[in-house]
Image (cartoon, rainbow, N blue to C red):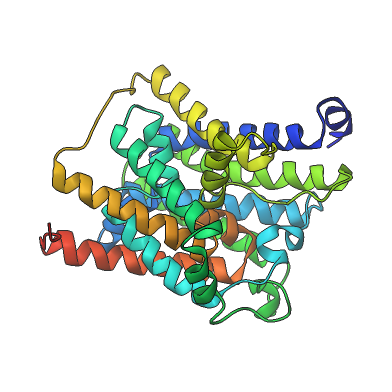
Amino acid sequence: MDILPLVEWLGENPTAALFGLITGVIFGVAGQRSRFCLRAATIEFARGQIGPSVTVWLLTFSTALFWVQGADLLGWMRVEEARIMAVPGSWSGAIIGGLIFGVGMVLSRGCSGRLLVLAATGNLRSMVSGLIFAVVAQMSLHSWLAPLRNWLAALWTTSGGQNMDLLAEFHLPDWGGFALGILLSAYAIYQARRNRMSTMRLVFASGVGFSVAVGYLLTFNLSEVSFDPITVTSATFTGPSANTLMFALDSTSILKFDIGLVPGVFLGSFLASVIARDFKFQGFENEANMRRSMFGAVLMGFGGMLAGGCAIGNGVTGTSIMAGTAWLALFFMWVGAMTTDYLLDQRRVALPA
């Protein structure tokens, strides 16, 4: 992929933002049409079902694994250069942050990526929760909550100055991740047939996973031709939401992949909802629902930053390159979400006023 003429024309930072925008638009369109949501999948699974929501999540997860690992095998990118793999990971952050994030996404009725997609379709509840999520994420990154986050993250970290590569750790072949992606995709398609899901929903579910591969390929190729260091990354919403918020408030901020990603998702989802005639303004049902959603957004903002990524950043983007802490964080997001659903919704235990 020869992107040098584009970089010379636009500059490195605007090109990074453009690549973020492209990745975001693909994610936004696919996420809106597939109704991808980790929270919905965990609740469905917690209630003893492998229905459409679990199937969509599984197809997204496996598609990202298939494309990213396939690109690495073909030499189109090197997964070890991705930021999440190239820096030390936090096991304690993955466990504690994953649990907190899982609780928060059930309370907010959507993970951070889903909130952004829904906000673009006129869902004011998601817009308010998403803004709270971004503010708390920023506080956890650089402000009042940063010392607590840093302390928790430092309790137990990976060794060797980088994250754990699960393929290398368990002495699996280089094609192990690619093969796993194929097997999981086949199982997802089997479940889709059982649930009589439409072909287009499956295509869009795969599109969410494909957007992760697109982001990695674009940022990797940009890093190969840039004079300044460029982070090899893809779709994630904890850090980018915080960075986009600060970009809007600080005139000295510079363009980068994150700054294009969030508006791209919003734009893609908005266009998809308008074309499908799904755009509709919606608000909070009542005060209790509002309190629950806002508190959940706070938990997701802190938990996602502590875990090193959200349901997308860890659960799809990080796992697709076989980063150890990403898989652990995803597991504890499922644990936190399923436990919360059981305690608060299945048992009909109300939150205190």
Q: Is residue 97 above or below residue 18?
A: below
Q: Nearer the viewer, residue 85 or 305?
A: 305
Residue found 69% across the figure and 48% down from its top: 216
- Please state the horizontal and vertical placement of residue 124, each as a whole percent of the image: 30, 32
Q: Nearer the viewer, residue 250 or 167?
A: 250
Q: Nearer the viewer, residue 32 or 45?
A: 32
Residue found 22% across the figure and 52% down from its top: 292
| Location of the C terminus (image quadrant) | bottom left
Q: Is residue 235 above or below residue 281?
A: below
- Please state the horizontal and vertical placement of residue 4, each as a whole percent of the image: 88, 34
| Callout count | 0
- Please state the horizontal and vertical placement of residue 59, each as a whole percent of the image: 48, 49
Residue found 39% across the figure and 61% down from its top: 101
Question: Left of 197 or right of it: where is 64?
Answer: right
- Please state the horizontal and vertical placement of residue 22, each as a whole percent of the image: 63, 32
Instruction: Determine the image quadrant of residue 15.
Output: top right
Question: Left of 74 or right of it: where is 83?
Answer: left
Q: Is residue 251 above or below residue 91?
A: above
Question: Left of 18 or right of it: where is 104?
Answer: left
* Residue 109, visible in the rendered structure: yes
* Residue 175, visible in the rendered structure: no
Residue found 21% across the figure and 49% down from its top: 291
Instruction: Determine the image quadrant of residue 50.
Output: bottom left
Instruction: Determine the image quadrant of residue 3.
Output: top right
Q: Nearer the viewer, residue 210 or 232?
A: 232
| Location of the N terminus (image quadrant) | top right
